[in-house]
Image (spheres, grey):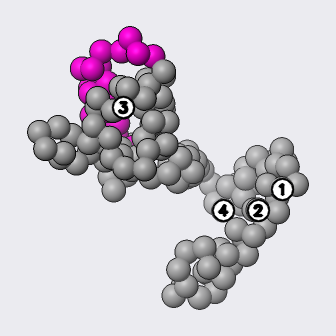
Amino acid sequence: MTRPTAGTTLGELERAIMEVLWAADRPLVVREILDELDDRDRAYTTVMTVSDRLAKKGLAVRVRDGRAWAYTAAATRSELTAQALRDTMAGWGGDESRADVLLHFLRDASPDEVARLQEGLRAVERAHADPTLPSGQ
């Protein structure tokens, strides 16, 4: 996977196309992406150009499908969001400031989100203790 460009922000159409790609269970050609967009007034060439731009940014992957290109999301929404957060925090001081930011962010978490995060942290701790374990074990 091409790594998403640092500081990548999505425009309105880019976000709409990514939503379509995240919802799809297979790569989609531009015509299929266009058909799934709420705004049916978009030009095919505009969707094609923006889809190509998403691939160049590393947010989508394109593969040949006959004479056309088919696009799929390069990663899940969560993975791409986490990468954007890591990129944002990369230039900051040591681990303490990153941890402080994350803890501040989590103050708004619901009890269900906290429980899910605790479960995830336990999996991370197990992975750090035994690097041979697959991720999420």
Circles 1 and 2: CB atoms closer than 8 Å: yes
Circles 3 and 1: CB atoms closer than 8 Å: no
Q: Residue at x 50, y 51 (%)?
A: 76
Q: Which residue is mark 3?
A: 33
Q: Which residue is mark 2?
A: 116
Residue 112 - label = 1
Question: Which mark is first along the chain, 1 or 3?
Answer: 3
The amino acid at mark 2 is Arg
Q: Residue furthest right?
A: 111
Q: Is residue 120 magenta?
A: no
Question: Which mark is first along the chain, 3 or 2?
Answer: 3
Circles 1 and 4: CB atoms closer than 8 Å: no
Q: Quadrant of residue 1?
A: bottom left
Residue 95 - label = 4
The local secondary structure at tag 2 comes to helix
Q: Residue at x 76, y 46 (%)?
A: 105
The amino acid at mark 3 is Ile
State the CA–CA distance, disc 3 to disc 1. 34 Å
